[in-house]
Amino acid sequence: MFKFDLQLFGGGGKKSKVSSIDAKLPTATADEKQLLQGQMDWINNTNRSANTLQGMGDAALNNVITPEYGNMYNSYLGTNRGNQNAIGALQNLVTTAGAKNLTDNTRYANQLAASVDTMNNGASQLANEYNGALLQNQNAMNSITNGQLPTGYADARRQALNNDLQATVGNAVSSLASRGIVNSSITDNALNDISKNASNTLAAQYSNDLGQAAALNTQALNNNLSGIGAKMGLWGNTYNNNQNGIINQANLMNQGYANQMNNAGTAAGLVGQREGLAQNPINTGATTQSAAIQPAKDYYSMSQLNNADQEDLLNRFMSLRYGLAQPAQTMVKQGSGGFFGGLMKGFCFVAGTEIATPEGGKVIETFVNGDTVITLGAVNDVIALHDMGEKETHRLETVSFGVTTTGTEKVLTPEGLKLVSELVVGEVIMTVNAYEPVTLIEATGNTEHVYELQCTGDNLFYANGIMAEGINEDELKAIADAAAEAPEEAPEEKPAKKTTKKSSKKDEPVEAATEEAATEEAATEDNKKVEE
């Protein structure tokens, strides 16, 4: 059973009379007690295991290996510098070899081009010779076709005939002379016969000579073409041999370059392996250390297995305790104006304040009868939205939330409900994130239009994430009574509006009743509550 002394109002004139009613916490059923005891027994038993696991974790930490990372790192740096130098040398080698290979390939390419040019020049010369031979043969054949023997051939033929004729005539004249008949008809007849025979022979040989000349010309052409072909073959062989020689040299050079590149790649791979080997001690040390720490981490983690259950159970106890720790009804009777002055200042929030509902946030000025709000572990129905008029405001902020309200608004603390104006920085209040410390609490100096909700159940709701209490019937009645005595200070029922302005008036306490009357009234109200 929790008891709270809620002295919420005061100041002004005579002392207020406050009656506190104990909060009646529901008695747990037998089943609830059994379940709670079972959970407590389980938690107590597992706590022993947790302590054992904690000790095992502590012992495991003594076996953790701490490698000499500094020495290993320094050793690695030395190897790394050597590897960098080796890579730099390989880069220079590759660059130099590449430049030389490019120069050599350019030279061989020029040699191949020169060889092609030489071959082209030789081919042009042979082509000219070939065309000349054909033309010469064509001209000779044209002359033969026209019955003209080649000059050389004709000259040789005539010389041969002359030689034969001279020999024949000479023999004939000599024979005739020996017989003494040189100047005779016999001589003339003999010479005529020789001349006739020579002419017949010459005529008979003419056709043969033309054919022979044609055959000789054709043979000369063939011999000429054969010679040209032979020269072409020799030149082709020379060209091919030259080309192959240049290509073979280029291939050998490129093979040498490829071998250099392969060697450089192999060397680079070896440098990379050396780099990896240099890193291995560090990696192995880290892996070994992590593996050595893991058992301790596992033990510690296992030791925390039931912690969530303990925290959940504790949070449930706290929520139930603080949620039910407020009296269902608080009876406050004042002497002079402190209470009424507090009422006139109101319990309310500015327009735009978001109230948590099962459907999400909803601004306070839009609520109607029948709407619902979220409270601690439950949902309350909205009875009414009250327009409280224009009031002086305070700014209240926590680590996560903030709201603008009046100083007489009540918020939930671990000690129960408390006025906003009585809070101090660092004090904890209930929010949707559980209890959070107050980071700011100060009067704004503004007078703003404010609203308040009246709800069923515990009459609590979240305003901008902060748990606050709505207005109740007793407070409404006290406000009405105060308004009856001082109507000029009563809250006005006005349409909701969101403007902010400075108040031109100060709330003034109404004329108080006597202390005796207040005491009598409080006693009467206590009796009514007891009867109820």
Image: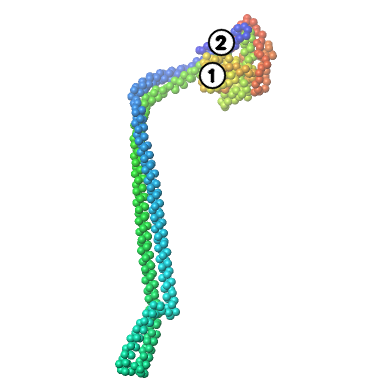
Instruction: Identify the residue at horizontal 62%, vertical 17% (top origin).
Output: 445
Query: Does the CB distance between marks 2 and 1 fall below 8 Å?
Result: no
Kindly tell me whether residue 477 is visible in this rendering: no
- Residue 49's label in the rendered image is none
Quarter containing the C terminus: top right
Circle 1: is it few (<14), some (14-19), or many (20+) Cα within 10 Å? some
345 over 260 or under it: above or below = above
Circle 2: is it few (<14), some (14-19), or many (20+) Cα within 10 Å? some
8 over 130 or under it: above or below = above
Q: Amino acid at mark 1?
A: Thr
Kindly tell me whether residue 321 is visible in this rendering: yes
Asked which quadrant contains residue 139, the reply is bottom left
Instruction: Identify the residue at horizontal 31%, vertical 90% (top origin).
Output: 174
Residue in the foreground of this view, choosing between 242 and 441:
242
Q: Where residue 175 sits in the image (x, y, percent)?
A: 31, 91
Mark 2 and mark 1 lie on one chain; the one further toward the N terminus is: 2
Query: Residue under circle 2?
Result: 20
Viewer-side label of 2, 1:
1
Query: Residue under circle 1?
Result: 439
Q: Amino acid at mark 2?
A: Ser
Q: Where residue 516 sits in the image (x, y, percent)?
A: 63, 4
- Residue 451 located left or right of residue 306: right
Asked which quadrant contains residue 365, the reply is top right
Residue in the foreground of this view, choosing between 60 and 285:
285
- Residue 272 located left or right of residue 349: left
Q: In whole angstroms, how far apart are the C-alphas of marks 2 and 1?
A: 30 Å
